[in-house]
Amino acid sequence: MKMKSTQALFECLLEQGVDTVFGYPGGTILNVYDEFERNGYGKKIRHILTAHEQGAAHAADGYARSTGKVGVCFATSGPGATNLTTGIATAYMDSSPVVFLSVNVGENLIGRDAFQEVDITGITMPITKATYLVRDASQLADIVREAFAVAASGRPGPVLIDILKNVTAEEVDFTPLPKEEHIKHGRLAALANRASSPLKHPAPKEKDLETLLQLIQKAKKPMVLAGGGIIRSGASKEFTAFVEKLDAPVAVTLMGQGAISGRHPLCTGMIGMHGTMASNVTTAACDLFIAVGTRFSDRVTCDLAQFSQQAKVVHIDIDRSEIDKNVVTAYHIIGDAKEILKALCDRMPQYQHKEWLEQVDGWRKEPDRQRSGMLDPKEVFASIDRQLGDDVIIATDVGQHQMWAAQYYNYSRPGQLLTSGGFGTMGFGLGAAIGAKIGNPDRVVIHATGDGCLRMNGNEYATAEYYGAPVITVLFNNGTLGMVRQWQTLIYNKRYAQTDLDRGPDFLKYAAAFGMPAWRVETAEQFDEALKQAIQCGQSALIECIIDIDEKVWPMVAGGAPITQFLLK
Amino acid sequence: MQHHTISALVENSAGVLSQVSRLFSRKGYNIESLAVGVTDDPAISRITIIMIGDDLAAKQMISQFRKLRPVIYVQEMDAEQSVHRELLLVKVKTETKDARDEVIQISNIFRANIIDVSRGALTLSITGDTEKNNALIKLLEEFGILELARTGIVALERGPYTIHDENK
């Protein structure tokens, strides 16, 4: 079928079931955007125009994380493309599947430092699973099909397609192909045939399962760590069944929140720098440490050399390159968490580790927190839990409020907490919340943030309001970059270099500028009431919680210290 | 710390070499030599890398390498079970007849070829493994090496085995 290459591009998006694209137009990508109007693709695929390409990137990411579908994001060349990079790196570090599509200058201008020309495939190489430069229109459909498959398969992640402008003006012969058939044709077929193909993963081998089952049988004090791989694999049901049969304590990473309900009696809460005492001490006391779908980040392990040294460490992950990268393991199984956990569960007797669990329960201690008398962040999350419970999606920015969101809320399902765990991107939250709301219109989406983060990408309220994708911002305003100040207080002898944010804006007026209702609250009762009204108002809303400038995240292990060496207040 | 020879088949397309070399630099791997050239299939190039590190580092590098989209096969070459060669071109100062004679003699012993002659200098070409080539360089140093270029190591397995067998 002869058609314009841009039309073929949209046909490819429809093949993938894409119904939403986040993006921002510009000079070089005009031919692509023209299709929204010219052939009416705008009726089948909704375009969400954000205030900034970074917001579009985070929104596509938040959409992907909260729906399990591949997110799609468009940008023009040059600054449009480079504005995506923080969003791409954020998606990459947290293994979120997003297809980014940019259009570069035409072939006749490439390499001539043309207006808005940049080597975006070169720039994004280290922060994507794959990059594609399309110089030949006949390759476009094949490349788009491959890009979607690569983004979603194995350990998911972002990919970038950069198309030359002249390619977007050409005619192609397009053959429609249902999604299930893609793997049998063209580049994808070749990729699938490779020995180390990223598109397939072997089923767990009986021998490997047997070895692990023997380790489990010998263990007297097993523990399990749930990572983000369980979320991406959709394996929370299998995971919960596995740990119940193993009868072992479970710690979760920041990205693993929701792999098992935070209310589950086996769950000891978060591990690592701001982990619970129970999780961290158990890590240093267990004799078998089974890590599922996690990469042993420095925020998890703390001092790597001393991490769980007394235990046999077993690693289950889909990405072979994560094995022995940070923690050298005694045993590993490569594959999909869902399949492996189910296979283990099927072959395992019901264990009882009553004494061990009692010992672990003895380590469940509330951290000793000094109260300022001002509004307690813990009470804020308790109020959200009371009013919204399991239905809510919480998207966070980065810093103290992010840790409170992880510590003080019991997540019960995958995709309930959206947070930039690996890259730690301030300004992620609002875009991600908008993407989540657009992908999950029936759920209430809370955007938890701080005053530092909101000043970065607050411009996206215009997007939320325009597209009727209301998000409720819970702003923890302490007038400072709280997490950095916490380090300055504890480690830098209270030298507060450049962390005071004593310069506005007035966030109530800021919200008003977008037509949003907003409340400033100083007590838990006021917050309760404001949240009730925010939920009812049916539009985006902002609740500014005034908290103490020296409110801290406890517990805390200093960077590089052993996991059980908690700082005292 | 030991030398590891890693051989890979990659797609012969723009940007692949830069993607590979950037992987090594950003992961902090210590690369001693990197050689690349097209294979009998014009769509495929072979990259040979000599890396210094322990076994764990080599294993980690191979799994990172394998993840790159344009990389088709990767294999670590066993030093005993493979042949390694590199091409070395070296321009030596030979201002006197004695010097010239002696360099020609050394060249013969090493089975190097003299590929360019002028009054003041000889250019030798030699193909061998790194140790042999280093030994030649050492001997030529006393005459004065004007310039030197080497291709980096390429390697293939001994016997009928190929990289395809390893990856089956």
Image: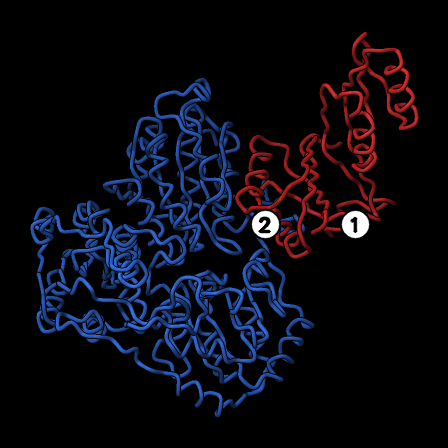
What colouring method underlies this structural image? by chain
| Residue type of the residue flagged with mark 2 | Gln
Whether residue A186 can be seen here: no
Q: Chain of mark 1?
A: B
Question: Measured from the top left, where is residue A345 in percent x and y?
Answer: 55, 79
**Amino acid type at mark 1:** Asp
Q: Is residue A344 left or right of residue B54?
A: left
Say which residue label 1 marks.
B78
Along the line of sight, the residue nearer the viewer: A142 or B155: B155
Q: Is residue B40 above or below residue A373?
A: above
Q: Which chain is blue?
A: A
Q: Residue at x 51, y 54 (%)?
A: A153
In the rendered image, residue B156, in percent from the top left (x then y), is placed at: 80, 41
Chain identifier, red in the render: B
Q: Secondary structure at mark 1?
A: loop
Q: Quadrant of the C terminus of chain A?
A: bottom left
- x, y percent for residue A1: 48, 32
Q: Is residue A451 visible?
A: yes
**Mark 2 crowd level (few <14, some 14–19, many ≥20, 10 Å Cα):** some
Crowd tier of the residue under label 1, counting other residues whose Cα lies within 10 Å: few below 14, some 14–19, many 20 or above: some
Report which residue position mark 2 lands on: B64
Residue at the image position 57 percent from the left and 45 percent from the top: B68
Which dot, 1 or 2, sits closer to the camera? Answer: 1
Q: Judge by depth and name the residue closer to the eye, B10 or B18.
A: B18
C-alpha separation, residue under disc 1 versus residue under disc 2: 19 Å
